[in-house]
Image: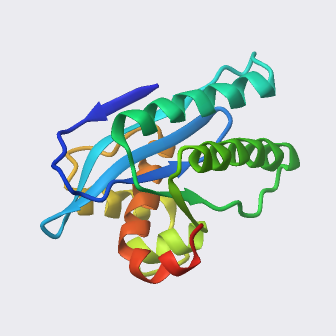
């Protein structure tokens, strides 16, 4: 579990953004502070390809529990599944997403899901924006010197930003 960390203040709503994947799951904890979006911590969970699916999913869940225990997010935003050309990939991502949803529910974190189109639209105003445009907008909004790597981490920041921008409307539809 790799991460970057900044300090937090009391009484701030912490949002966990998650970009699910079996090989790499991106995560980010952000808050809105005085009208600005502040990343408190972000990173990724990596699993070994040589491990079995059940071992990889357990590792994702265990690492996510540690992140939740450390940062105590009240809400989480997770990317919804979208069309995949590779059926094996979609099954693996769905398994990881299921483990993440279960972990969030067990930890009492309210969850909202967003499609890639919704994230792109929330950050760039255009639902068909390419990945680079979304990443550059995330970097700009968060006032980051460099874009977080891997892409899954940058995507988790974007998903969390989407949630904070959309939460007043979307909380009606979150679990």
The quarter of the picture where residue 22 lies is top right
Looking at the picture, tell me which residue is in the foreground, 45 or 49: 45
**Furthest residue in direction left, as rendered:** 34
**Furthest residue in direction top, as rendered:** 50
Looking at the picture, tell me which residue is in the foreground, 1 or 62: 62
Residue 42 left/right relative to 119: left
Residue 102 left/right relative to 10: right
Q: How many marks?
A: 0
Q: How is the image coloured?
A: rainbow
Looking at the picture, tell me which residue is in the foreground, 23 or 172: 172
Q: Residue at x 50, y 53 (%)?
A: 109
Q: Residue at x 83, y 49 (%)?
A: 86
Q: Position of residue 55 (x, y in %)?
A: 74, 22
Q: Is residue 2 above or below residue 98?
A: above
Q: Residue at x 68, y 27 (%)?
A: 58
Residue 104 in view (yes/no): yes
Q: Position of residue 42 (x, y in %)?
A: 36, 40
Q: Residue at x 80, y 21 (%)?
A: 52
Q: Position of residue 102 (x, y in %)?
A: 67, 46
- The image quadrant where one finds the C terminus is bottom right
Q: Position of residue 144 (x, y in %)?
A: 22, 49
The quarter of the picture where residue 95 lies is top right
Residue 129 in view (yes/no): no
Q: Is residue 167 above or below residue 135?
A: below
């Amino acid at each position: 579990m790799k991460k970057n960390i900044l300090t937090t203040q009391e009484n701030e709503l912490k949002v966990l953004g998650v970009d699910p994947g079996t090989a790499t799951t991106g995560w980010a904890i952000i808050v809105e502070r005085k009208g600005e979006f502040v990343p408190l911590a972000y990173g990724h969970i990596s699993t070994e390809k040589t491990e079995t699916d059940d071992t990889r999913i357990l590792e994702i869940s265990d690492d996510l529990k540690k992140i939740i225990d450390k940062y105590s997010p009240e809400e989480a935003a997770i990317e919804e599944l979208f069309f995949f050309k590779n059926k094996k990939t979609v099954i693996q991502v769905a398994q990881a997403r299921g483990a993440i949803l279960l972990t969030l529910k067990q930890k009492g974190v309210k969850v909202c899901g967003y499609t890639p189109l919704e994230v792109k639209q929330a950050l760039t105003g255009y639902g068909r924006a390419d990945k680079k445009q979304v990443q550059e907008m995330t970097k700009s909004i968060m006032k980051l010197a460099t874009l977080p790597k891997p892409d899954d981490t940058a995507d988790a920041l974007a998903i969390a930003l989407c949630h904070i921008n959309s939460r007043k409307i979307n909380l009606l539809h979150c679990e």
